[in-house]
Image (cartoon, coloured by chain):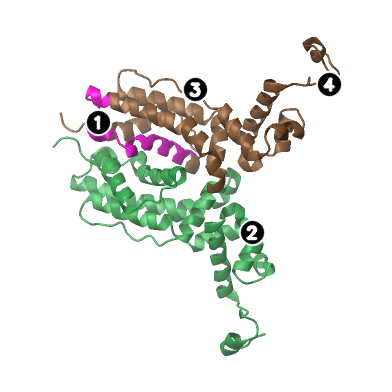
Chain colours: A brown, B green
Amino acid sequence: MVTSSWAAAHAQTPVPRRRGAVLERAILDAALEQLSTVGWSGLTMEGVAAGAQTGKAAVYRRWPSKEDLVADALRSGLPEFGSAPDLGSVRDDLLHLCLQARDGMFSRSGLALRSVIHECDTLQAERFHAVIFEGVVEPTLKMLREVIERGIERGEVRPDAANSYVFDAIPAMMMYRSKMCGSEWTDVDLTEMIDQLMVPLLRRSGP
Amino acid sequence: MVTSSWAAAHAQTPVPRRRGAVLERAILDAALEQLSTVGWSGLTMEGVAAGAQTGKAAVYRRWPSKEDLVADALRSGLPEFGSAPDLGSVRDDLLHLCLQARDGMFSRSGLALRSVIHECDTLQAERFHAVIFEGVVEPTLKMLREVIERGIERGEVRPDAANSYVFDAIPAMMMYRSKMCGSEWTDVDLTEMIDQLMVPLLRRSGP
């Protein structure tokens, strides 16, 4: 049993025995790694333990079930949502948000979140509903709403555009093409979506 | 072994021994039933055989794998796509298409198709890509395109609306809210989507 960090670094065993927050972080990262590569269905507690270079017992001690572990892993991987961008035009603001969302979608936590969204049946999905909605969907909608409402105030956007179908258009389109076409949503794809879908949808008709 | 339909109806065994197309139909229906209730992950060859009131051997003889059976079951359940509606306005045509699509989504074959779309990983999904795209996505897009192009000809719809982001908006929104919110897409929901998303997206700006 190592008693000092020097001894830990130079111990015979390749991985020093970690405790507390460090070990938990390693386990949560291993869970995110599994989710983003083999998905919810491929993730096993054994696989996560191996990925964290620890034993199954260390995982089960803290997380009695796969659902418990995945819920905490998703939560630990949530991005920070800053304030909505304010670049001068609703088109540029939306494009900035989309680029950020795309980066998030294809990050390890984004891939992890999507595997859970796509693979979990309704019963299991209940367990993760809170982290998905409160952690990602609602902060994203909040920023979209801010950008669109600012556009209405500036006279760029028609007054009746602040409705849930307009707010859902971008998330819906990004999820759809990613799922159905394997789209990687390049910068060009996102620019086209903003210009061909969102700008016509939002602009005022007439002078 | 029964030799006449009278004897079959009055035989000791509750289910007469079926052959050929009748038995195959029963197996495919049982597969659709399984997919629509317990999904791809819940479907087993044993469960399908039981649902078709036949033995596993009868299933495996014709379909060596789960993927083979599911591909044929999905194909057998595909709806007939008629010509695009022509009710006098693009709004009414789109609403009609949406009501049809909604009915399809929530039919047994629709639920079966969606379980495959949502649960299959990319590797498995390759197998079903053809039936999903050729069987449902492309015929649907074809009708959306017809309606929108007719609207352009009539001067109802702006000329630059015939693009893939506009065509994908309805399928994307319907899939998104169904998956993320468990939306059942009532007639009112569909009417709101047409009026709040599609009409502003498509109409000409200015006189």
Q: Residue A161 in magenta?
A: yes
The residues tagged by marks 1 and 4 sit, at their Cα atoms, a distance apart of: 64 Å
Q: Label 2 is placed on what type of residue?
A: Thr
Location of mark 4 (residue): A13
Above or below, A54 against A122 in this view is: above
Q: Is residue A112 left or right of residue A183?
A: right
Q: Is residue A54 or residue A100 the one in the foreground?
A: A54
Q: Which residue is mark 1?
A: A203
Query: If the image is split into quadrants, where does the N terminus of chain A sit?
Result: top right
Whichever of callouts 4 and 3 sits on the residue coming sooner in the sequence is: 4
Question: Rounded to the nearest whole Å, what is the CA distance between mark 1 and mark 3?
Answer: 30 Å
Give the number of the disc on residue A80.
Answer: 3
Give the vertical position of B145 relative to A63 (above or below). Answer: below
How far separated are the C-alphas under marks 4 and 3? Answer: 37 Å
Between label 1 and label 4, give the one nearer the viewer: 4
Q: Position of residue A122 (x, y in %)?
A: 53, 47
Q: CA distance from mark 4 to mark 2?
A: 45 Å
Disc nearest the viewer among 4 and 2? 4
Q: Residues within 10 Å of mark 3 (few under 14, many from 20)?
A: few
Q: Nearer the viewer, mark 3 or mark 2?
A: 3
In this rendering, position of residue B149 left or right of residue A99: left
Q: Secondary structure at mark 1?
A: loop
Where is residue B160? Give x, y as percent. 27, 38
Please provide the residue range marked out in magenta. A151-178
Mark 2 sits on what residue? B44
Residue A121 seen anywhere in this rendered image of the structure: no
Does residue B89 appear left or right of residue A16 in this picture? left
Give how far apart the Cα atoms at labels 3 and 2 are: 42 Å
Q: Can residue A41 be spotted in the picture?
A: yes
SS label for mark 4: loop
Residue A188 is situated, as x and y percent measured from the top left of the image, at 41, 28
